[in-house]
Image (cartoon, coloured by chain):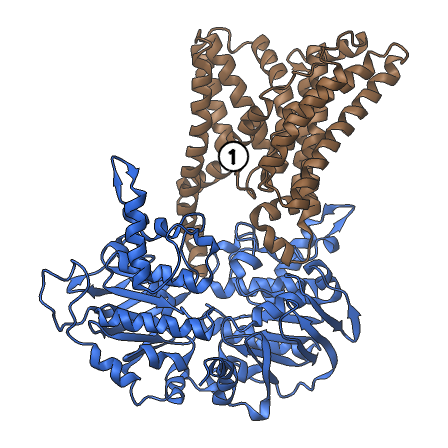
Chain colours: A blue, B brown
């Protein structure tokens, strides 16, 4: 498969007018030169340099948080690099907006598609340049051109269909057709197959091969390692914001790729508290179903135990813990806390039952960014601070001061807004608010995402302390070495079910990853 | 992480001027604007700086201040209440109907009317909140519906006529003036503002109002039910519409189904000029009082300056927009000062 793709790659004339003036060149279409990008509290990209050849299928790999999204956003004009430069088609490339990136010939198809649902397919395809005469849209011309584009991606739908009535796979193809409409020279696809069925994936790959024959360069990001061989010639691996390697895919096996992606050793991470002996059941989940059709999920967490949940993004990890917490509705299932069956239909009932959830997205779901540190901590239990509805501010401040000191939250005062805090400090405030509430089960969804190494270590230490206090802890994380360093055992999620459970004695990255990826391989019919 | 500590040092060593600007911007932005406007008219408009004129202004802002107090709660949670004007109309006819009943002595009918007004208003508000939360309809739509429903009900209750002949003791109380410049109805408005300020500042409920306006989902995921609080703020807005109806009766001595037309927009304007953010979470009820003052001072001052009636709304409309534009600059300046 890979071999015959390579044969078709070189020296095909680029599509459209953009390439006509200049002779086919052998210089790379895209070059990153010492590119760096930092956000408050994190360095997202550091000194990244690599090249993408004209007409090739280039695959970008890396764990969550490795810097892939940042890199794509630099290409798409969402952010601008702080250091270094990007060269596109022989010229410096620094788009100030997505529109500019688009007009320069780079089309980014994001995982969450950017189509306008209430407009027709044709309107979406030609939105930036609707055929018109004296300000009136020429619908006949628009639909004719749209039909041509749809034929190119082999999509058999009417151009006047509303986009909101299409399936995800069809929308994806519309996005790609849109790239064709604008004669894009580089097509960036961010996890295009995450939500597609295997048949739709095959179809997408056929289209991508077609585009490649027409000279379009693709940058392809995916978590499904099996499929990258079908679209990629070369691969670039990022890790912790740094460039690891760029090399041909041929001769590179999946285990090699995983090794390149993970890199670190487990010892870099948190410390396992082998002094804690779990006892008694803290949380039990039996027959949990998110919808009537979804698979059943059953597991339990003992007091003093840290249980990890591994799996790819989209494997149903977050959905499962949100349903346990009552944040989203569930179709079936019973939950016991400390052996007592509890009825949980809302977060309020979950908190009352002794379960708390540190959400994956702390800014949108965990914190009141415009409010003070103290107000964020005490929001989980204001009753304790009040008498007849009146707040006891002195008690509030004292409680907040205590937690800020014990968690070493770095803030000048407890009255500062948490929106100004670094990621690690914000996460500590989230921990503080749940410590203030007190609970028997702590569920942490991506507790260390986007926070620096020092703060990570403190969060791990804190989890150890809570486990030692007899709490049951469930940690969802994409960072496998992290889970392997702190957990007693790991549940591996895949396609909405628990694909396997690995005990601490048997921890092995390859084993866990193969469980996580296994279902996808099977679904692809290989 | 290090940037947190650096910021502290900067804060300590920041110049006196920076601190002065920061504090006055944060705490007194609108109040300063009010003072400037009052000084301007005092210097330019004849009769502006007289006790009689201030008395007149206090009489005129009472109704809007009471309405805007309740509106502040709703807007702080990120909602809007367009129905307060016609709920006020409904309450005036309900209250007036009770008070003109010849079978009841004023000692019975006046308290009864007050209770009926507050109950009617609160009921309308509770319905607004409940419909919003039950079916997840934007409050803009629900209260727009209530605006029409309450207006229709007011016509039904009053049989399409104005109700006059309120008890003399009630009318007398409405005309009462204390210390030469403080009319009774203005004092009622101040009491409402003080209660509102106390609730927002010192109670658990007030904390939730700000928290929900800041991030409703985070409040829900912290183990609370934001719906109850959101229904409550609409109920408060309805309740203050009922109180404002009593103030209306005290001032104009008639119950009318066509009272209160456009009042909701004045109330919203007062809240916004007072610095409360339409998206919720930020603002203060004291600011709302100042906002109501600015609106009325402008109207009165322009009139005394001899401005034509047609010019007044143009100026006031411009000021409303300017206030919000300036507020975004104020926030940017504050952020820059804090980031430095």
Chain at numbered mark 1? B
Q: Residues within 10 Å of mark 1 (few under 14, many from 20)?
A: many
The secondary structure type at the circle numbered 1 is: loop
**Quadrant position of residue A41:** bottom left
- Return the residue at label 1: B275
User: Is residue A101 rendered to the left or right of residue A332?
Assistant: left
Residue B267 vertical position relative to residue A151 in the rendered view, above or below: above
Give A247 or A32, whichever is nearer the viewer: A247
Residue A297: x and y in percent read: 65, 76
> Is residue B215 depicted above or below B143 in this figure?
below
Q: Residue at x 69, y 87 (%)?
A: A277
User: Where is residue B222 drawn, in percent x and y?
Assistant: 65, 58
- Tell me where residue B169 sits by quadrant: top right
Q: Is any atom of residue A252 visible in this view?
A: yes
Image quadrant of residue B132?
top right
B257 vs B232: above or below: above
Tell which of B278 and A457 is nearer to you: B278
Q: Quadrant of the N terminus of chain B?
A: bottom left
User: Does residue A303 appear in this view?
Assistant: no
Direction from residue A205 to residue A168 in the image, left or right: right
* Number of numbered callouts drawn: 1
Q: Is B36 or B75 nearer to us in this picture? A: B75
> Looking at the image, which residue is at 25% across and 73% down?
A49
Q: Position of residue A163 (x, y in %)?
A: 43, 53
Q: Residue at x 71, y 68 (%)?
A: A332
Eyeballing the image, is A310 above or below A509? above
Q: Where is residue A233? Give x, y as percent.
A: 27, 80
């Amino acid at each position: 498969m890979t071999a015959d793709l390579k044969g078709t790659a070189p020296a095909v004339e680029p599509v459209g007018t953009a390439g006509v003036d200049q002779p086919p060149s052998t210089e790379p279409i895209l070059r990153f030169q010492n590119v760096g990008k930092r956000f408050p509290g994190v360095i997202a990209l550091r000194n990244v340099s690599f090249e993408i050849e004209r007409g090739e299928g280039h695959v970008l790999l890396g764990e969550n948080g490795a810097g892939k999204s940042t890199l794509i956003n630099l290409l798409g004009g969402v952010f601008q690099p702080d250091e270094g430069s990007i060269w596109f088609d022989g010229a410096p490339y620094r788009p100030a907006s997505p529109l500019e990136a688009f007009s320069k010939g780079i089309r980014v198809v994001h995982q969450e598609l950017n189509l306008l649902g209430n407009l027709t397919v044709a309107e979406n395809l030609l939105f930036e340049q609707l055929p018109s005469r004296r300000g009136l849209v020429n619908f006949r011309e628009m639909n004719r051109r749209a039909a041509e584009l749809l034929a190119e991606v082999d999509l058999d739908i009417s151009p006047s269909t509303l986009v909101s009535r299409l399936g995800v796979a069809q929308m994806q193809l519309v996005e790609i057709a849109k790239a064709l409409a604008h004669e894009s020279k580089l097509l960036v696809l961010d996890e295009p197959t995450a939500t597609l069925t295997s048949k739709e994936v095959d179809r997408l790959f056929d289209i991508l091969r077609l585009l490649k024959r027409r000279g379009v360069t693709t940058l392809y990001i995916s978590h499904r390692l099996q499929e990258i061989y079908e679209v990629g010639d070369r691969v670039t691996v990022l890790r912790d914001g740094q460039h690891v390697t760029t090399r041909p895919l041929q001769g590179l096996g999946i285990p090699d790729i995983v090794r390149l992606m993970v890199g670190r050793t487990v010892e870099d991470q948190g410390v396992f508290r082998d002094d804690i002996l779990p006892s008694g059941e803290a949380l039990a989940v039996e027959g949990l179903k998110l919808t009537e059709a979804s698979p059943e999920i059953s597991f339990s967490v003992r007091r003093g135990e840290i249980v990890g949940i591994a799996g790819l993004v989209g494997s149903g990890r977050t959905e499962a813990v949100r349903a346990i917490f009552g944040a989203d509705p569930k179709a079936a299932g019973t939950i016991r806390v400390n052996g007592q069956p509890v009825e949980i239909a809302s977060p309020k009932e979950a908190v009352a039952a002794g379960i708390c959830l540190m959400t994956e997205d702390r800014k949108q779901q965990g914190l009141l960014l415009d409010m003070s540190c103290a107000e964020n901590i005490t929001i989980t239990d204001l009753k304790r601070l009040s008498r007849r509805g009146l707040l006891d501010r002195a008690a509030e401040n004292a409680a907040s001061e205590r937690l800020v000191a014990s968690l070493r939250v770095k803030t000048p005062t407890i009255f500062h807004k948490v929106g100004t805090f670094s990621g690690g400090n914000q996460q500590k405030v989230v921990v503080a608010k749940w410590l203030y509430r007190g609970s028997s089960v702590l569920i942490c969804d991506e507790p260390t995402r986007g926070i620096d190494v020092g703060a990570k270590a403190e969060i791990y230490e804190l989890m150890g302390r809570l486990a030692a206090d007899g709490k049951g802890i469930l940690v969802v994380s994409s960072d496998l070495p992290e889970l392997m360093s702190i957990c007693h055992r790991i549940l591996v999620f895949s396609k909405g079910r628990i694909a396997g459970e690995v005990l601490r004695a048997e921890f092995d990255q390859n084993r866990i990853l193969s469980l996580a990826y296994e279902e996808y391989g099977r679904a692809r019919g290989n | 992480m290090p940037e947190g500590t650096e910021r502290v040092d900067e804060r300590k060593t920041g110049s006196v001027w920076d601190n002065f600007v920061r504090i006055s911007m944060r705490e007194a932005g609108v109040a300063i604007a009010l003072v400037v406007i009052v000084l301007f008219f005092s210097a330019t408009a004849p009769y502006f700086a007289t006790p009689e004129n201030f008395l007149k202004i206090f009489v005129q802002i009472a109704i809007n201040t009471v309405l805007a107090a309740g509106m502040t709660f709703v807007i702080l949670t990120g909602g809007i209440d367009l129905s307060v004007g016609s709920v006020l109309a409904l309450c005036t006819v309900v209250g007036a109907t009770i008070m003109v009943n010849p079978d009841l002595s004023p000692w019975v009918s006046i308290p009864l009317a007050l209770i009926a007004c507050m109950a009617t208003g609160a009921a309308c508000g509770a319905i607004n909140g409940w419909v919003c939360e039950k079916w997840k309809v934007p409050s803009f739509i629900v209260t727009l519906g209530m605006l029409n429903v309450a207006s229709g009900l007011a016509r039904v209750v009053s049989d399409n006529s104005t109700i006059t002949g309120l008890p003399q003791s009630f009318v007398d109380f409405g005309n009462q003036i204390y210390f030469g410049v403080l009319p009774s109805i203005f004092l009622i408005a101040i009491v409402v503002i003080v209660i509102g300020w106390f609730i927002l500042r010192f109670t658990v409920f007030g904390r939730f109002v700000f928290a929900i306006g800041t991030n409703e989902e985070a409040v829900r995921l912290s183990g609370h039910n934001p719906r109850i609080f959101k229904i409550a703020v609409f109920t408060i807005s309805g309740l203050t519409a009922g109180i404002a109806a009593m103030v209306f009766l005290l001032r104009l001595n008639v119950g009318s189904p066509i009272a209160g037309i456009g009042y909701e927009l004045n109330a919203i304007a007062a809240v916004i000029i007072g610095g409360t953010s339409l998206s919720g979470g930020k603002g203060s009820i004291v600011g709302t009082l100042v906002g109501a003052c600015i609106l009325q001072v402008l109207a009165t001052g322009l009139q005394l300056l001899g401005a034509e009636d047609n010019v007044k709304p143009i100026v006031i409309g411009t000021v409303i927009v300017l206030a919000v534009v300036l507020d975004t600059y104020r926030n940017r300046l504050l952020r820059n000062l804090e980031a430095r």
